[in-house]
């Protein structure tokens, strides 16, 4: 009973965050969501829970695809590099899913953390400039 209530509370909190978010914050939420799903997938790999591993990795792949689709390709080289990186990450997660390989998931988590760190820094700069 408690777990169900906690999930419902979390869902409401997530919906509220999304509704209140500016475009930059939405990207942060997507990155966080991908990281959470990859971390959960690692746990499922460790427990040999194939169904849940598959579900979490597919969800992470969908989020990364959404990030890829949201790129402004008119922004130049950075966007093209991110597009290639997202494509690589997607292919690696497919491979991790097929091989049940936690190390590949760790690799993609590391790449996503680098993107997160850069994106979080950009947000702080943007907020400082807006003041």
Image (spheres, rainbow, N blue to C red):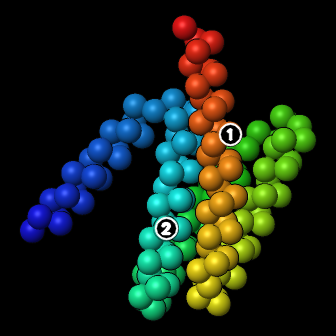
Residue placed under numbered mark 1 in the picture:
118
6 w.r.t. 101: above or below: above
Write the residue at 90% across / 41% down: 77
Residue at figure coordinates x 60%, y 29% from the top left: 123
The correct choice, above or below, for 10 with respect to 124 in the image is: below
Tell me the crowding category of disc 2: few under 14, some 14 to 19, or many 20 or more residues within 10 angstroms, Cα based: many
Report helix, strand or loop for mark 2. Answer: helix
Q: Position of residue 36 (x, y in %)?
A: 47, 61
Pointer 1 local density, CA inside 10 Å: few below 14, some 14–19, many at least 20: few
Q: Residue at x 33, y 39 (%)?
A: 16
Q: Residue 100 got which mark?
A: none
Residue 129: percent from left, percent from top: 63, 12
Answer with the quarter of the image where residue 51 lies: bottom left
Q: Is residue 110 left or right of residue 54?
A: right
Instruction: From the top left corner, tell me how far across and down residue 55 is, in percent.
Output: 47, 77
- Residue extending furthest top? 131
Tell me the residue that label 2 is attached to: 39
Give how far across and how far down residue 35 sits, in percent. 53, 59
Residue placed farthest to the left in the image? 1
Task: Identify the residue at horizontal 21%, vertical 51% (top origin).
Answer: 9
């Amino acid at each position: 009973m408690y777990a169900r209530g906690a999930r419902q509370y979390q869902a409401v909190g997530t919906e509220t965050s999304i509704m209140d978010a500016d475009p930059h914050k939405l990207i942060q939420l997507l990155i966080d969501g991908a990281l959470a799903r990859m971390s959960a997938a690692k746990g499922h790999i460790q427990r040999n829970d194939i169904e849940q591993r598959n579900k979490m990795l597919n969800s992470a792949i969908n989020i990364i695809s959404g990030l890829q689709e949201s790129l402004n390709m008119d922004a130049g080289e950075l966007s093209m590099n991110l597009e290639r990186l997202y494509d690589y990450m997607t292919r690696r997660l497919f491979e991790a899913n097929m091989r049940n390989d936690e190390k590949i998931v760790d690799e993609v988590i590391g790449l996503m953390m680098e993107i997160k760190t850069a994106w979080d820094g950009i947000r702080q700069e943007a907020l400082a400039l807006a003041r």
